[in-house]
Amino acid sequence: MLCIGLLRAVPGRRQIYDALWNDTHVIAKMFSHKISARRHLGREVRGLNQLQKRGSNSAKPLFYGKAEDGRWAVVIQKIVDSVTVLEALTQTAHKREKLDLLMRVCRELAKQHGKGILQRDLHLENFLLAGDQVYALDPGQMRFFPRQVPRKTSISQLALLVRYLQTDDTESAGALCEEYFKTRGWDIGQSDRILLAKQLAVHRKRGIRHALKKCLRTSKRYRRIETGRHVAVLDRSFCQEAAPADFIGQIDALMDAGRILKNGNTCYVSRLMWDGMDVVVKRYNHKGLLHSLRHTIKRSRARRGWLNAHHLGMQEILTPKPLAYIEQRRGRLIWNSYLVTRYTEGPSLYHFLRDESIAPEQRAATTQQAKDLLDQLAKHRITHGDLKHTNILMTENGPALTDLDSVQFHKCDWTYRIHSAKDRKRFDRD
């Protein structure tokens, strides 16, 4: 067998290759865990066989056993001219096309449940799209029942699919729900809709927690680096041509050579070009030993800003795209920290409202957009911590929040009310 390229790797556990075997294009999954590799292989093979037995759309198993290098391996048919459903959804711009794509997955999911197949790790990367067919992936993470998947469990799985829609797209969510129940041959009741809404809220919160953990480690989208005195996490779209270590090592000199936007005691902000990107770097300055100790314990402001920007993005609240955060350390103490974001074109709300050349209609539309932003924050019980007009940028896509290190996501109504009142008071002061 000749491996052509590595498709995915989980270090110390498994690697998935695009390969040639007997002049046939195949997918080879290699299991490398020292203790559990054989068990993982057995689970994968049993899952593949069950999918074939139950007539579900899936790749055919061609071989399993030990490879030449001693690793346990399973070789399966390659579905040619295919993409994951997540890739297809990302490349689809129109709302109607997105819904049609999710409808196809919904029907396949309903058929799986009807055949007693339950995906324990249901996400759109575990569905493959080839022409009009949707194929199931990762059978090692599936459970197989002698009868249909129960109604309550089925609705919970449906909620995992609905969460890929925008939170306010209730029409599409209803259409997916009706399509699923129609495929299962069930009548939908009010209790089913209530359960779906509850499960959807649970899965969205859980999905955000999981995604935020991935923002802090090396993954498909991010790269974590520890070099010398620095610890950093970078979006893989940043520093594609230039070495990340070069940027990290000379970050202060780059900021000094850039366009200084703010030079205060607490933070230093500069706009600069790096690797073809127009970026803004915000440095949170060292202000003494106790200050460093406090931010080492409660985490750096750059790290908080990085996580808050991603969290707000998951709630569909616009912010400048976060590209990296960097912590400069002395021993175990955080000395300085840096947040890198893509430069976002647009005036602040403060300067926009004071621009006499702005037409009254445009001023009214902008004021409404700002109110909508506040309503969106209230809907998710989010407070900013310093909600002044200069921290809202008016972009072509709508208002974008900046200065995010004090943002809080409240679980309790009473804490939200207290902090929200402070936000409103600060906003109205301008």
Image: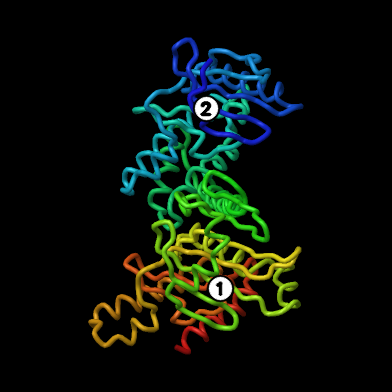
Residue furthest toward the bottom? 429
Report which quarter residue 278 is drawn in. bottom left
* Above or below, comparing residue 281 to residue 233 in the picture: below
Query: How far apart are the two marked residues, 2 and 1, measured between alpha carbons?
Result: 44 Å
Q: Position of residue 314 (x, y in %)?
A: 50, 57
Report which quarter residue 85 is drawn in. top left
Q: How is the image coloured?
A: rainbow
Q: Tell me the crowding category of disc 2: few under 14, some 14 to 19, or many 20 or more residues within 10 angstroms, Cα based.
A: some
Left of 18 or right of it: where is 139?
Answer: right
* Above or below, comparing residue 345 to residue 139 in the picture: below
Q: Position of residue 353 (x, y in %)?
A: 34, 84
Which residue bears the numbered disc 2? 114
Out of 313 and 118, give the one closest to the viewer. Answer: 313
Q: Position of residue 381 (x, y in %)?
A: 56, 69
Left of 372 or right of it: where is 383?
Answer: right
Out of 336 and 365, give the one closest to the viewer. Answer: 336
Out of 219 and 5, give the one closest to the viewer. Answer: 5
Q: Tell me the crowding category of disc 1: few under 14, some 14 to 19, or many 20 or more residues within 10 angstroms, Cα based.
A: many
Report which quarter residue 272 is drawn in. bottom left
Amino acid under label 1?
A: Thr
Amino acid under label 2?
A: Gly
Out of 136 and 40, give the one closest to the viewer. Answer: 40
Left of 180 or right of it: where is 290?
Answer: right
Which residue bears the numbered disc 1? 383
Q: For marks 2 and 1, give the one nearer the viewer.
A: 1
Element marked by disc 2: helix
- The residue lying at 59 percent from left, 62 percent from top is 326
Element marked by disc 1: strand
Total labels drawn: 2
Q: Quadrant of the C terminus?
A: bottom left
- The residue lying at 65 percent from left, 54 percent from top is 226
